[in-house]
Amino acid sequence: MSEFKKLINAKALYQEPERIWVAKGMKFFAIDYQGKRVTKVYRVGGLKDRVLSCHRLSSQLLRIGLHHLLPLKNGNILVTAKRKTYILSPEGQVVNIFQGYQGNKPGHQGVCVTPNGTIFFAEYLLNPKRDHDINLWRSVDNGQSFQIVKTWPKGDIRHLHFVKWDEYEKCLWLGTGDYGENGAENRLYRSADNGESWDLIGQFSQDWRAIGLCFTPDSLLWGTDAGSCPDTVHFVRMDRKTRKIEILQDFEGPCHGCASYMDGRAFFSTGVEGGENELDKYARLKEWKSGKCETIFKLKKDCWPLIVQYGVMRFPLGSDKCDKVVFTAMGLKENGECVLIEK
């Protein structure tokens, strides 16, 4: 088993080679890999949200706080809060607020910036009756405006799980969920033209239900997110050439996180959300090595109800340009919301 140490009580949102952007409630800043703050403290939101986000239990229960951070091509910074996305200048001035989307926030890998600076923003809402159109948004002006680039009509899918840039194929991948007849809502799409068109690569199984992807030169890797259904959670590999998938192994719980690193390593995390397919009450960190995922670290769910926070380990975005493993533990014993780093 590997060893990790607590770096700071916060959420790691974006990782860079020399620093990590973290959030505490409605404020954010960057720290170095020893935990020392290296930027100014940025703040967004009104007084009510700032007060409610001060305590991690109220913040998690009410979903108040910051959830994503992305540096933009022009030097500005994008951060998502509950039902609001802020674009800030490097000096901390709010230059735009985007509120036109549905749901509280995108999924953990539901927002990305491509190398040319285009922003993609995937709607994630509960949508249990499938009575909402679901939209993918795009900005080509560094977040000054957003337009809908693709819509799934009501009844087609529940929501969007992720949108992610693939440096190997120079394309975008997008995942949807959750159920549907024969798993019809679980889909993987690919776009090679900056989101103008999307090719459907696979569907009709819980094995296509992913919350994110890891990339290697010859394959795409993911764990399935079958948390609230009886299907066994699988670790899946898709061959880049054939587009065929194979199940490599079973996981002990739903896969809630994944991250690729510059040195070729890939990591996945399973969570605790009370599903019938979970082996126990532990969240696990797994490393992809020699064709298999091996558990290298685990933490038990804390005493607070699942409605407050699932027990999860979430990786910051941007890890593919870094070589140090960092993740946020949330809802776990003695690690209610903190950043952990490998020793």
Image (spheres, rainbow, N blue to C red):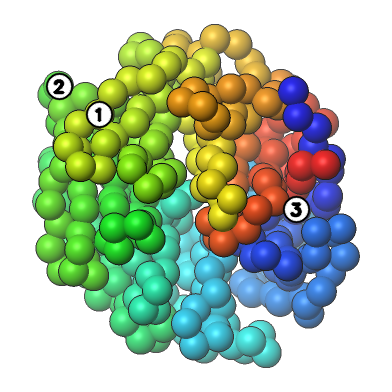
Residue type indicated by callout 1: Ile
Q: Please identify the quarter of the rendering in which residue 129 is found.
A: top left
Q: Which mark is residue 182?
A: 2
Q: Residue at x 76, y 29 (%)?
A: 2
Query: Sequence-wise, which precedes: disc 1 or disc 3?
Result: 3
Identify the residue under disc 1. 245
Under circle 3, the secondary element is: loop
Quadrant containing the C terminus is top right
Q: In front: 42, or 189? A: 189
Q: Is residue 294 above or below residue 160?
A: above
Q: Position of residue 140 (x, y in %)?
A: 31, 82
Quadrant containing the N terminus is top right
Residue type indicated by callout 2: Asn
Q: Position of residue 9 (x, y in %)?
A: 81, 50
Identify the residue under disc 3. 10
Residue type indicated by callout 3: Ala
Q: Which mark is residue 163?
A: none
Query: Sequence-wise, which precedes: disc 1 or disc 2?
Result: 2
Is the residue marked by circle 1 packed among few (<14), some (14-19), or many (20+) residues within 10 Å?
Answer: some
Q: Please identify the quarter of the rendering in which residue 182 is found.
A: top left
Q: Residue at x 55, y 84 (%)?
A: 76
